[in-house]
Each structure stands twice: as C-alpha cells, then as structure tokens.
Image: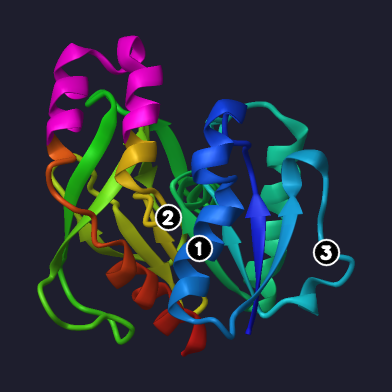
Amino acid sequence: MKLGILKTDAVRPEWVPDYGEYPDMFIALLGGLDPSLEFAVYDVEEGQYPADIDEVDAYLITGSKSSVYDDKPWIARLMDFVRELDRRGKKIVGICFGHQLVAQALGGAVEKSPKGWGVGLHTHTFAATPRWHDRDDPAFNILVSHQDQVVRNADGAEVLASSPFCENAVCQVGEHILTFQGHPEFVPGYSREIMEYRREQIGAGAYAEGVASLARSPESERIGRWILNFLRA
C-alpha cells in the first residue's frame, strides 16, 4: 500500500532536528507498525499534488496552524481535492486540521470553540466500536492541540468517539473516510513544546492541565493500528 501524505504545515525550524516535519511523524508511526507501507509526500501549501489521483492508494491530511475557514487559496484548492477524492471513493484519513477540513469540505462547519484550547492528553470514548477497532477498552488517550472544533459534521458522517470537551472527536463517512481530532503522530515532548510556545494564547489553566496530563501516555501505536486496519479494509 502507498499512502499519500498531504502536508498542510511546517514544523518550527528549531524543533525539526528532534521531531522532524509532520510527514516524518506519520511515517515513523505508521511505517514503524507496517514496514511494507510506502509513502509519498505532497506539500499542498506549496501547491504540490499528485499528477494522477490514483498514484497512491489512500491519502492522509496532516494538522496545521491554519484554520479551515481561513481565506487562503491553498485551503480552497485542498477542499476541492477532498471533494474529488470523496466522489471517487478514495480512502482519506484526516488528522486535526485534516479532520476539520474534511467536515467543512463535505457540508459541515468548523468554528473556534467557546471552550477554548484543548491541549495535552485527552481521553476520547467510542460510543460503538467499528470493524477496524480492536474492540478492547472503548476509551483511548490521545494528544491534542486545537481551538477550532467541528460544530456540524460532514454530510453522512457518523460520530464514533467523543469527549466532554470535543463532541466530534472521531468521525467516519462511509467506508472511505476516517478522521481524528487528536494527533496520534505527536509524542509528549512535541506536545510540550507547542504548549510552551502558545502558553499565553492557551491560558494559564489549560496550560497547567495540559502539562500535568503528560504524566500519562498516549496510545499512539494503538491508534496507528486502527488507521492501518481502516486503510486495509
């Protein structure tokens, strides 16, 4: 299987030596679980797209500091691309910004949440376990970093998992689109870097809770296996 990663942001240069760029994080997670997986990276901020939509088997949309409702030409073009992928039934995995962009592109809506920033480790819980789930504990821990939230889901989307902070945490459209608000590709050190950098924006209370939450471990490999199960199905 060949996975096309649609890169929607760049990691701050001072963090790249330790954590890599966003595609590197996904390659480390998913490639570590399945060494046979192949990857292609398209920097859609810079207008890079595949010459043929079928040159990869599936697509993954990364997180971004941008908001999906920003008036940026590259975001509008990416939404058009997602609509085309949806029309063709190509598999898509959306992460954070990708989760929100899929919703907005396919009839939903995204807004800044009055709940403020979600940072650090959050627990999301499945209401029902889909076929690609391991069917163990329905609750799982995942690192998050977002202020925007999906307030209306994509047409035909099913909400699979949620939390008191994020009602639409994991969503699926048909058998070809799966999106997560959280970041399975993040490691705790990178989560801490972001919280430190955005400390004033996040606010003292959310910052303190977020840093304290890093005493627990994310279930990144478990979530990575779910993504692979979904892609292979």
Three-letter code for the amino acid on which mark 1 is drawn:
Ala
Element assignment for label 2: loop
Three-letter code for the amino acid on which mark 2 is drawn:
Glu
The tag earlier along the polypeptide, 1 or 3, is 1
Q: Main secondary structure of the magenta part?
A: helix
Of 25 and 62, nearer the camera is 25
- Does residue 114 show up magenta in the picture? no
Q: Is residue 26 visible?
A: yes
Of 137 and 212, nearer the camera is 212
Please tell me which residue is depicted at 18% across the width and 53% down the height of the picture.
217
Element assignment for label 1: helix
Q: Circle 3 is placed at which residue position? A: 50
Three-letter code for the amino acid on which mark 3 is drawn:
Pro
Pair 3/2: label in front:
2
Q: CA distance from mark 1 to mark 3?
A: 22 Å
Specify few, some or many for label 1: CA neighbours under 10 Å numbering under 14, 14-19, or 20 or more.
some
Whether the residues at callouts 3 and 2 have beta carbons within 8 Å, the answer is no
Pair 1/2: label in front:
1
Residue 182 on image: x %, y %: 34, 50
Residue 124 lies left or right of residue 104; in this view the side is: left
Of 101 and 38, nearer the camera is 38
Q: Circle 1 is placed at which residue position? A: 28
Q: Is residue 147 visible?
A: no
Pair 1/3: label in front:
1
Whether the residues at callouts 1 and 2 have beta carbons within 8 Å, the answer is yes
Q: Which residues are magenta?
A: 192-212
Residue 144 lies left or right of residue 230; in this view the side is: left
Q: Circle 2 is placed at which residue position? A: 185
Q: CA distance from mark 3 to mark 2?
A: 23 Å
- Does residue 204 show up magenta in the picture? yes
The tag earlier along the polypeptide, 3 or 2, is 3
